[in-house]
Image (cartoon, rainbow, N blue to C red):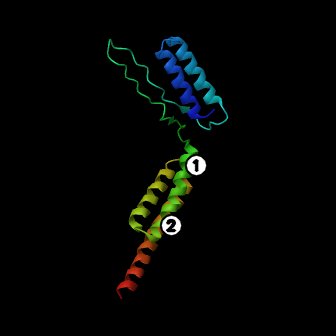
Amino acid sequence: MSSEDIQVKLREYKKLLDEGIINNQEFDDLKKSALQNFQTSGDMKEAVELKTISESKPTGDSQEKVVDRSTNPIVQTKPMSDREKDTLFTVLGYVFAVVAIFLVPIAFGAGGVIFGYLLTRKEQTKTDGVIIIIVNIAATILGMLFGYAVWGNMMG
């Protein structure tokens, strides 16, 4: 069952509630059932929380305002694990080193050194962090030499 199917069902349930065919408890039960079916379906790879049509209370003779929030689902993801962060910092450290050779060596080299430092704070990634720091310092120096050579050829 797709997100659009759920949204259609929830709108139908809300309409039944507004028309007085079902009560609030029945509406809540139907809504909960539909969302549970959606969350346990095979189509969904991540937990998705649908913002459903807000329930409004009638205010005398004035018209009810219904805010439809069902068209904007919010994807909730789990936080990154320490291992995933370490992998991300390692990859970014090396990528920054390569970029530092060709583009803004001081900025990207410094960024790579920061990623290396973040890895040195843990015992299991300390060696990787030191290597990334050294590689980024070397890449910064190479990048400045490369820039000097290119600038010299362009001007001379």
Indicate which disc residue 87 carries: none
User: Relative to the observer, which residue lies in front, 73 or 89?
Assistant: 73
Image-based side of 54 in relation to 33, left or right: left
Residue at mark 2: 98
Image-based side of 110 in relation to 36, left or right: left
Residue at 37 percent of width and 22 percent of height: 65
The quarter holding residue 108 reads bottom left
Residue at mark 1: 124
Dividing the image into 4 quarters, which one contains the C terminus? bottom left
Query: What residue type is disc 2 on?
Result: Val
How far across and down, in percent of the image, does residue 57 sit? 39, 15
Residue at 51 percent of width and 57 percent of height: 92
Query: What residue type is disc 1 on?
Result: Gln
How far across and down, in percent of the image, does residue 122 sit? 53, 47
User: Relative to the observer, which residue lies in front, 70 or 86?
Assistant: 70
Circle 2 SS class:
helix
How far across and down, in percent of the image, does residue 43 sit? 65, 37
Dividing the image into 4 quarters, which one contains the N terminus? top right
How far across and down, in percent of the image, does residue 2 sit? 60, 34
Circle 1 SS class:
helix
- Rendered position, 14 above or below 25: below
